[in-house]
Image (cartoon, helix red, strand yellow):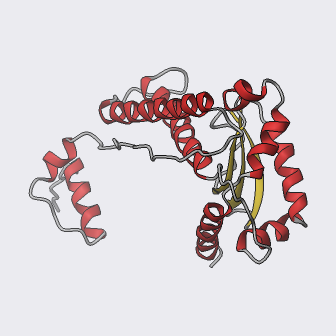
Amino acid sequence: MSSNSKKITTADLASVIRDSLGLPARDNEQASAQKPLNESYVTQSKQFDLRTEFLSEKNKSNHLELMEEYISSLNEVSAKLDSVDRSDTNSNSTEFRSLKVDEAYNINAAFLHGLYFENISDMQSQLAMDSLTFMRLERDFGTFDDWQKDFIACALSSRSGWVVTVYNAFLNRYINVAVDSHNQNIPFSSFPIVVLDCWEHAYYRDYLKDKKTYVHAMMKELDWDIIETRVKKAEKISKVTNS
């Protein structure tokens, strides 16, 4: 009895995987296998109409510029991840690890700022008691007032970070999260609903160390229509994760 052994190449493996997934074969799997991973993406900012008089024009201008800096940093990190050496990695100090840490930091910084700007500055802020948002917050916190008290407590507890009401798919309920920095204390499987910036740069120019007055001011002008849209998305997530 004799047998011929054949070395399995990366291209062979890629071909088997593509076939198992029902994907068409490529003309040159070997050439494809040699290509670097394409991880890059480009993030762009939206335009926000910050009409609120609870923040000064200088504050709003500088804050929007800060968000642009986070977006620029995120795009820079994304581009570098395309060509970084993934074969030389460890948990102590490698370029790849540093880039992945920076990626998470800047993703949260950029998008949390966008969500924050989007859900503040409604001069006619109103929340209907028959809205999905009101009913869900009342269900999970006991009363709407209890949600507000918990939200404010999280805001005042945050150490240069954020307070975020999230839908958590693990718990299948809405909770408030006190975020430190941009990326600490955030439970997995959380979808942001209400976002409030609690970094010093968000309020110190206008309120000095009176963080509580700033928090109350922003909550008076929450855009509940925007928040209602997010809750409806969270409810769709709930149906999928709990089916």
**Residue 140: % across, % down:** 83, 66
User: Which image quarter holds the C terminus?
Assistant: bottom right
User: Which image quarter holds the N terminus?
Assistant: bottom left
**Residue 147: % across, % down:** 85, 58
Q: Is residue 68 toward the left or the right of residue 206 in the image?
A: left
Q: Is residue 135 toward the left or the right of residue 108 in the image?
A: right
Above or below, 125 relative to 67:
below
Judge by depth and name the residue closer to the eye, 116 or 98: 116
Farthest residue to the top: give it. 93
Judge by depth and name the residue closer to the eye, 84 or 28: 84
The residue positioned 29% from the left and 62% from the top of the image is 17
**Residue 172: % across, % down:** 73, 67
The residue positioned 51% from the left and 40% from the top of the image is 107
Farthest residue to the left: give it. 27
Q: Is residue 237 toward the left or the right of residue 173 in the image?
A: left
Residue 86 appearing in the image: no
Residue 17 appearing in the image: yes
Judge by depth and name the residue closer to the eye, 118 or 178: 118
The image quarter in which residue 23 lies: bottom left
Q: Is residue 225 toward the left or the right of residue 126 in the image?
A: left
The residue positioned 20% from the left and 55% from the top of the image is 12
The image quarter in which residue 71 lies: top left
**Residue 55: % across, % down:** 68, 36
Above or below, 126 relative to 28:
below
Above or below, 125 relative to 98:
below
* Total count of labels: 0
